[in-house]
Image: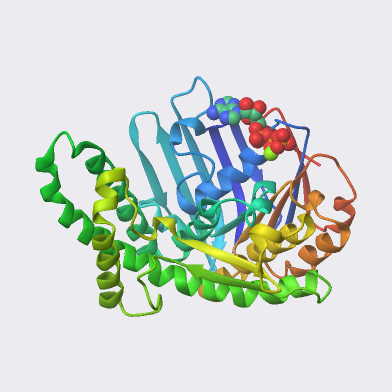
Amino acid sequence: MRLDSLYLENFRNYQSQQISFHPVCNVIWGENAQGKTNLLEAVVCLSCGRSHRTRTDRELIRFGEGGFLLEGAIRARDRDFISRIEAGAGRKKKISVNRVPAKSAAELSGVLNTVFFSPEDLQLIREGAAARRRFMDASLCQLRPRYAAALAEYQRLHEHKTRLLRDCAERPDLMATLPDFNLRMAEAGAVLIHYRSRFARLLGQYAAPAHLECSGGREALEIAYATVKTVTDPFGDHRTLVGQLLEHQRSHHSAEISSRQCLSGPHKDDLEVSLNGVSARSFASQGQTRTAALSMKLAAREIHREIIGEYPVLLLDDVLSELDPRRQEYVLNRLGSGQVFITCCEEDRLHALLKGSVYRVSGGVVLPG
Ligand code: ATP
Ligand code: MG
């Protein structure tokens, strides 16, 4: 799949910008704070309806303006699509595909998929579990509409239950609603576990050979999915998973009441990454951390291709120049048939390595070469 052109209006530091892209490789360069990451962010938005960098759409609106508009011409599954997002402060965002209003942002993911890789992701290994959950969520929300719906439902229930636990000392009557929350969280949670366990397994299958090759055949990478303790088999059937999640909630009931926190459920899930049998989070060197993070991102790209049948659009934000020549070459040789967008600061030697179009971004304006 590929993004053929993009129109941005009042999005971040862009006022009004139309750009046509190369089907294979697009290099976007410019000085700091000119709008390179903002441009990739716009592409992410077109693939999932929201930004990976913000919680609210308001931040995406150009300062002093009332709303933004993004429109992308996309080629996927041998068809042409126009995906469009219009958002304004205080009103519901309007999403359409081929001029037909979409019921949810999931319809955008049915057209365009992206894998975004930035220097922050190089910390995917070292950071807390939240970074790895975000990574799983970003891929699965695009690939599985049912996952996206379950995650939204789970997050809503989680917030609500947290408020309830906070307020129930003052208002004991609220306690009566807790069993209902627990059941609905277990139902949604079981869906998350179903998809995450399968994603983690595929991730390990694709990331291990990438890491092995990138480390010169020295390191075996393994990825294990860690979820709620009472879950004996995350590949088990839905009813069993729900039962085991309820069991965990029961055993943590009094701890939740006394700590006033939601302690039970897959909102604490993690991916345990190990290299040659030892925890990468605790022991990996900087180079190993980079290689493992890179392998996981490229693995996510392969999973998209396996499930969708086409490579997603790969967005490399400032990341290639952070890798040594061997890893750069590894990434560039793996691109295969997919489209890629690469940002960098200098017009450096990368340009010589890549065949495609070059754009320069300056003050929210995109110029050729
Ligand atoms: P770097 O090389 O440092 O990563 P960049 O080219 O990727 O730079 P961006 O992150 O795209 O830079 O941001 C460019 C500018 O956009 C920043 O100076 C920021 O202040 C500005 N900006 C961010 N949000 C908005 C907004 N809502 N309205 C107007 N300008 C914004
Ligand atoms: Mg940037």
Ligand 1's quadrant is top right
Task: Identify the residue shown where x is 39% and y is 28%.
Answer: 89
Relative side of 331 to 338, left or right:
right
Task: Identify the residue shown where x is 54% and y is 71%.
Answer: 224
When asked about the image quadrant of residue 215, the answer is bottom right
Judge by depth and name the residue closer to the eye, 309 or 162: 162
Relative side of 43 to 325, left or right:
left
Q: Position of residue 286 (x, y in %)?
A: 77, 54
Relative side of 111 to 254, left or right:
right
When asked about the image quadrant of residue 145, the answer is bottom left
Q: Is residue 336 above or below residue 74?
A: below
Q: Position of residue 337 (x, y in %)?
A: 69, 69
Q: Is residue 18 visible?
A: no
Q: Is residue 275 visible?
A: yes
Q: Position of residue 57 (x, y in %)?
A: 44, 36
Q: Is residue 134 above or below residue 76?
A: above
Q: Is residue 359 above or below residue 130?
A: above
Q: Quadrant of the C terminus?
A: top right
Task: Identify the residue shown where x is 40% and y is 31%.
Answer: 88
Task: Identify the residue shown where x is 73% and y is 70%.
Answer: 211
Q: How many marks?
A: 0
Q: Residue furthest top?
A: 64
Judge by depth and name the residue closer to the eye, 283 or 224: 283
Q: Quadrant of the N terminus?
A: bottom right
Judge by depth and name the residue closer to the eye, 240 or 18: 240
Q: Position of residue 210 (x, y in %)?
A: 72, 72
Q: How is the image coloured?
A: rainbow
Relative side of 205 to 283, left or right:
left
When asked about the image quadrant of residue 188, the answer is bottom left
